[in-house]
């Protein structure tokens, strides 16, 4: 008996990056099964197909992997390639799908959200190109979840996933692979490992905080084993089901241990952190935090120094709320720069069409066309390779960059877990007032234009509307407001603030001070604190 009767669950609508819910919701009998069967149905079944499977090691991941294997077998899949221990970082999964020519893959993660019995779990489907399913596919999955009446799953003992090798589950081959090897080999192809070994050999010091999440084993293999960084360079390197209680989101608020060390007297030369599933990154120099928007711009400006990009970039792309720092680099390089809605999936078409080789987002995501996901350790290696090639530290590289291109002062203010109705009413009011804002003054700033961002994909012509509010001030400053698409509780309001300073004076101010007039104008125009009763943001990046 492989067919099991079931009934639809409400709310199985994949968000920006797959379906994310509180773990107990996922653990309800039939919940995961319904979503996985709906996914299989939405991609015309998996008969004869090869899939990749793995996740970030969070609570319920191992059980979910067993369930998905039994469902794949019952649905006629030919082969599933699983990371040992059901582990795969998101970029490593993307690489395996591409490298092995798989038909797609399932990633078990809720990314940067905490894990554990009462925290978050998630499942995401990636396509044959290694990238997240586009909206047409996630919509088809959601439609299927609303009408599902049965799922297929064989009854069998659990498959041993703790040793590399092949076994059978009914007719299906289960191939357990080392989760790290293929990824680390790819990094050796892209970067100048010889120069990086030299850097560490000369005493360059680094701290990599893997936040008890999936990048630990990857970072130990790459930095300590292959590049010769001292043991202990990578901390919190053991992936744990609850991430050791850490909130594995690499930003100054959640990666506070790393921040304290990097801002302290004993700071190493370079610091970095990654998130739950290994696709995000934060870069910190001794005493300097690098904003993700600046990181993207620096990587773009220096990519030609890295062997994998020695022939130059095809083009670059950033999400709309990301600062325009990279736009200035694109102009200097003479390459196209695309502005997309928030969400890595929008970059996939541009990369597949050969229009861009480098992409980034303010949300601590940077990556290139080597895979179809953002890639945290890749970004760290980009920085290390640039540091090695230029013989400069992070602070010097930043100062040099701003001197050449000017500085886009930038910060994001987050208001978390707001009552959904309050947040919606506030932005609804703003929507109604957008037209009338033009020409108005606030805090000495004049509104030049105000609109809601909509995007037409230049490759397939698809249109995505309602992608965030933009208020542009005369002189090039702006504020962007949107609701997070990745939270699992209430509404999270993100406020993105930006001001351009051409220099040569005024390039070394504190971003919060440099942005103070825009912060005050935003409060005057939108009334966030007044309407939510909050005293200030929960997270500042
Ligand atoms: C995920 C996606 C990113 C996106 C981010 C935005 O990490 O992979 O591409 O930028 O979510 O999250 P938000 O909470 O702002 O919707
Ligand atoms: Zn992630």
Image (spheres, rainbow, N blue to C red):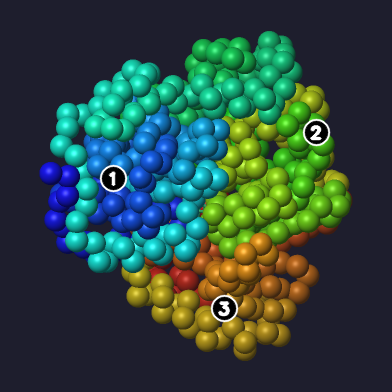
Residue in view at x 59 percent, y 52 percent: 348
Q: Is residue 536 visible?
A: no
Q: In the rendered view, would you say 455 is above or below 122?
A: below
Measured from the top left, where is residue 408 in percent x and y?
Answer: 73, 55
- In this rendered view, identify the residue nearer to me: 296 or 266: 296
Mark 1 or 3, which is nearer the eye? 1
**Mark seen at residue 310:** 2
- In this rendered view, identify the residue nearer to me: 412 or 196: 196
- Proximity of marks 1 and 3: CB atoms separated by less than 8 Å: no
Residues at marks 1 and 3, CA–CA distance in whole angstroms? 54 Å
Measured from the top left, where is residue 300 in percent x and y?
Answer: 75, 43
Measured from the top left, where is residue 392 in percent x and y?
Answer: 78, 28
- Proximity of marks 3 and 2: CB atoms separated by less than 8 Å: no
Where, by quadrant of the figure, is residue 55 drawn? Answer: top left
Residue in view at x 58 percent, y 20 percent: 223
* Residue that mark 3 sits on: 525
Residues at marks 3 and 2, CA–CA distance in whole angstroms? 46 Å
Quarter holding the N terminus is top left
**Mark seen at residue 75:** 1
Mark 1: secondary structure: loop
Upstream in the sequence, badge 3 or badge 2? 2
Residue in view at x 68 percent, y 14 percent: 197
Is the residue marked 1 within 8 Å of ligand 1, measured from its CB? Answer: no
Please tell me how many numbered marks the rendered image carries. 3
């Amino acid at each position: 008996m492989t067919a099991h009767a079931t009934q639809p669950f409400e709310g199985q609508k994949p968000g920006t990056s797959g379906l994310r819910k509180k773990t107990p919701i996922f653990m309800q009998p039939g919940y995961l099964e319904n979503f996985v069967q709906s996914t299989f149905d939405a991609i015309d079944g998996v008969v004869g197909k090869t899939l990749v499977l793995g996740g970030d090691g969070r609570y319920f991941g191992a059980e979910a992997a067993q369930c998905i294997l039994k469902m794949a077998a019952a649905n006629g899949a030919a082969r599933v390639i699983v990371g040992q221990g059901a582990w795969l970082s998101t970029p490593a999964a993307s690489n395996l799908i591409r490298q092995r020519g798989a038909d797609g893959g399932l990633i078990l993660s809720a990314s940067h959200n905490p894990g554990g019995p009462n925290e978050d779990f998630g499942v995401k489907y990636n396509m044959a190109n290694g990238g997240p399913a586009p909206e047409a596919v996630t919509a088809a999955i959601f439609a299927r979840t609303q009408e599902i009446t049965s799922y297929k799953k064989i009854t069998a003992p659990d498959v041993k996933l703790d040793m590399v090798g092949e076994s059978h589950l009914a007719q299906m081959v289960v191939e357990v692979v080392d989760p790290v090897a293929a990824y680390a080999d790819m990094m050796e192809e892209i970067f100048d490992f010889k120069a990086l070994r030299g850097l560490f050999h000369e005493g360059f010091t680094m701290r990599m905080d893997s936040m008890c999440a999936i990048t630990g084993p990857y970072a130990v293999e790459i930095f300590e084993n292959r590049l010769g960084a001292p043991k202990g360079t990578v901390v919190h390197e053991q992936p744990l089901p609850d991430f050791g209680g850490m909130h594995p989101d690499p930003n100054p608020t959640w990666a506070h241990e790393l921040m304290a060390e990097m801002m302290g007297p004993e700071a190493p030369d370079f610091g970095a952190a990654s998130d739950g599933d290994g696709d995000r990154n934060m870069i910190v120099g001794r005493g300097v935090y690098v904003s993700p928007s600046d990181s993207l711009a620096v990587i773009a400006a220096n990519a030609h120094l890295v062997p994998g990009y020695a022939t130059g970039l095809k083009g670059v792309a950033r999400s709309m709320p990301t600062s325009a720092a990279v736009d200035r680099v694109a102009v200097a390089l003479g390459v196209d720069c695309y502005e997309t809605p928030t969400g890595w999936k929008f970059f996939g078409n541009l990369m597949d069409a050969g229009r861009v080789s480098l992409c980034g987002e303010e949300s601590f995501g940077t990556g290139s066309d080597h895979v179809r996901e953002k890639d945290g350790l890749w970004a760290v290696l980009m920085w290390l390779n640039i540091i090695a090639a230029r013989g400069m530290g992070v602070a010097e590289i930043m100062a040099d960059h701003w001197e050449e291109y000017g500085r886009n002062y930038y910060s994001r203010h987050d208001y978390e877990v707001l009552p959904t109705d309050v947040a919606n009413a506030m932005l609804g009011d703003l929507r109604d007032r957008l037209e009338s804002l033009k020409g108005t003054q606030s805090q000495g700033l004049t509104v030049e234009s105000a609109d809601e961002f909509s995007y037409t994909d230049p490759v397939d012509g698809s249109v995505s509307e309602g992608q965030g509010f933009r208020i542009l001030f005369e002189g090039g400053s702006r504020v962007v407001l949107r609701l997070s698409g990745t939270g699992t509780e209430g509404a999270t309001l993100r406020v993105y603030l930006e001001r351009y300073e051409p220099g040569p004076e005024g390039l070394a101010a504190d971003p919060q001070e440099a942005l103070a007039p825009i912060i005050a104008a935003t409060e005057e125009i939108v009334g966030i604190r007044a309407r939510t009763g909050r005293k200030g943001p929960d997270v500042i990046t």
